[in-house]
Image (cartoon, grey):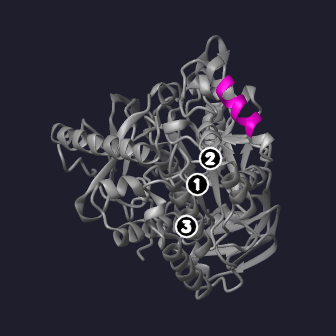
Amino acid sequence: MTTKTTERNPGRNRAQLVTNRALRWSVAIPRGLSAYWIDMLQRTGVAVTLLGESDARGAVAFCAGVDLAGDVAMLAQLRALRDSGVPLVVDAAAFALLTGRPARVLRASRLTGVGRFFDGADDVRMPVRIAVAGGAKYGCVAPQGVPAIAIDEDGNAPLIGLPLPAVAELDGAAPRVERFPLPRGRSTVEIVSGCDHGGLRRLVENALRIASHAAGLPFVRFAPAPGNHIGAFAMRVDADSFEATATTRTLEALARGDVRATWFIDVERHARRGGVAAVREIVAAGHEVQSHCWRHYTYRSRRKNRANLARSIEVLSAWGVEATAFAAPFGTWNAGLDAAMRDNGIAWSSEFSRCHDDAPGAWPHSRVHRGAWLTDPPWQVPVHPVCPGMMFVAGLSADEIHEHCAAIVTSKLVRGEPAVLYGHPIGDLERLPELFTSLDRTLTRLEDTARGGTAKELTPVWQPTLSELCAFHRARRHQAVVCRVGTDHLEGEVRGPAGLWIDLPDGTRVRTGPGRFVVRFDESALTRRDPAVGNESGGVRRLVPRSSLRPVLARMRIGVARWKREVMRQAGGE
């Protein structure tokens, strides 16, 4: 792997600066940073501290959406941090103030690119206004086709400028139909969040890693699963209606793969069609049961959503199930629904029209619903939004669906994200009796690969319910890590449920469990890595013109509608 040692300011190697100093390893943020960005950093798994409240050495600083032009003291503090050798990742407005290169505001649709900045974020949906830093060279903003990411190396530490939108812009992006690629050049569509929050988070995470490595520092974050587990895999099952055979087949398939799932129950149809005993059987099998509303419908009205949700919770309680979470029918999210969930004491939800393919988080937003600011909504536990039934509609065979799901799970676990899939019993999971057995083989291969490396003490992939996954991510936010950095080792202690993932500048990844740790490595592992290495100038534009996608999307919408009608017909739905 190519590395580069900078000649600028010799003797200021970051490893030497912090040798034998106790550090609180974190991402330092300024006061006034939006709760959205703080939540994003915490979903990434990094510890977060305020500038000035801890020793900033050993940290990367992040700043976005802060009015630095009106806060001269904060601007001076960021400049002083960079002069002391702390790398900075900022938005285009801050980059302009720190470098004197004016930013350019664009109405974007997507952000694409190739290289280390775009690992897991090569096509980020962002139909909002964004500011692009002056002198940007990497990535591409569509449809304008201009470069998106800028790097400045003129100071004692690298400065990276990202095209980050304002939080109000993100909140204003309505859910939209998005195309998802499938094997053999096929695709399907689903209604998902207007902005790809998961892709945006991965872009920020990659920039933090690149900035750390450019300063000769490891990138340290908390592990994605508790203890020594190598990752987390979870399953969500949406029982939109009740059909005894489909429920039984789905339970049998889950049992064969030894998978516990979280079931969201359409309460009214289960009550009307004799599904109460099946709900109790699901609980007895070790699965989790939560609410999918009384009536399978999402209203615009906070009052109607509150009543619909409250009745489902009441009936489930009578069946012996205490529901504390919820998933909206058809994945339809709105601000009134968040308010209704909070009214009913819902702890978390799972809405892919709010977020998808990401880690659990608080997802704070600033929408106003009938005069009330919803700044503390229930947590979200995102899933991959394409269910196997949609893949069947697109023409995939059962074996192709097995392989595609295995690829999704593998990519997420390798990146350090929870892998959460979802499906329905009727016309969907009942047709895939070997899906979870196939996924179990995939998880076993990943476990064997991890144990064959430097982390032989690792334990199997953690398979929680979604409530357990949410609880872990809540607890992880209160952790901190204190360590000492030497020229050939890291040592320290981490308290809490999660261990650490440590990415060294030479490309090596080291995992540790909770508690005390010592990580040894060759001295060259902390050689500064040029932030430009591994990134291509320019970006990747859409290979298919947007106009030519319209008939494809139309055909897929028709196919999905037919599939949903057929599922309801088979179940005797209304």
Please tell me whether residue 1 is drawn above or below residue 192 in the rendered image: below
Whether pointer 1 and pointer 2 mark residues with C-beta atoms closer than 8 Å, the reply is yes
Residue neighbourhood size for the residue with mark 2, other residues' Cα within 10 Å, grouped as few (<14), some (14–19), many (≥20): many
In this figure, which residue is indicated by the disc labeled 1?
236
Q: Position of residue 447 (x, y in %)?
A: 59, 80
Q: Most extreme residue toward the bottom, as rendered?
A: 452
Q: Nearer the viewer, mark 1 or mark 2?
A: 2
| Residue at mark 3 to residue at mark 1: CA–CA distance | 17 Å
Please name the residue shown 44% across and 37% down the image.
195
**Label located before the other in sequence (3 or 1):** 1
At 28% from the left and 51% from the top, the residue drawn is 539
On the image, the x and y values in percent for residue 419 come to 55, 61
Q: Which mark is residue 331?
A: none
* Among the 4 quarters of the image, the one containing residue 62: top right
Using the rendered view, name the quadrant where residue 372 is placed: top right
Disc 2 target residue: 264
Classed neighbour count for the residue bearing mark 1: other residues with Cα under 10 Å, few (<14), some (14–19), many (≥20): many
- As helix, strand or loop, the secondary structure at mark 1 comes to strand
The amino acid type of the residue labelled 1 equals Arg
Q: Which residues are magenta?
A: 307-315
Viewer-nearest residue: 193 or 153: 193
* Image location of residue 244, percent across then percent down: 56, 56
Vertical placement of residue 430 versus 315, above or below: below
> Considering only order in the chain, which callout, 2 or 1, is on the residue closer to the N terminus?
1
Judging by the rendered image, the residue that carries numbered circle 3 is 413
Q: Nearer the viewer, residue 24 or 347?
A: 347
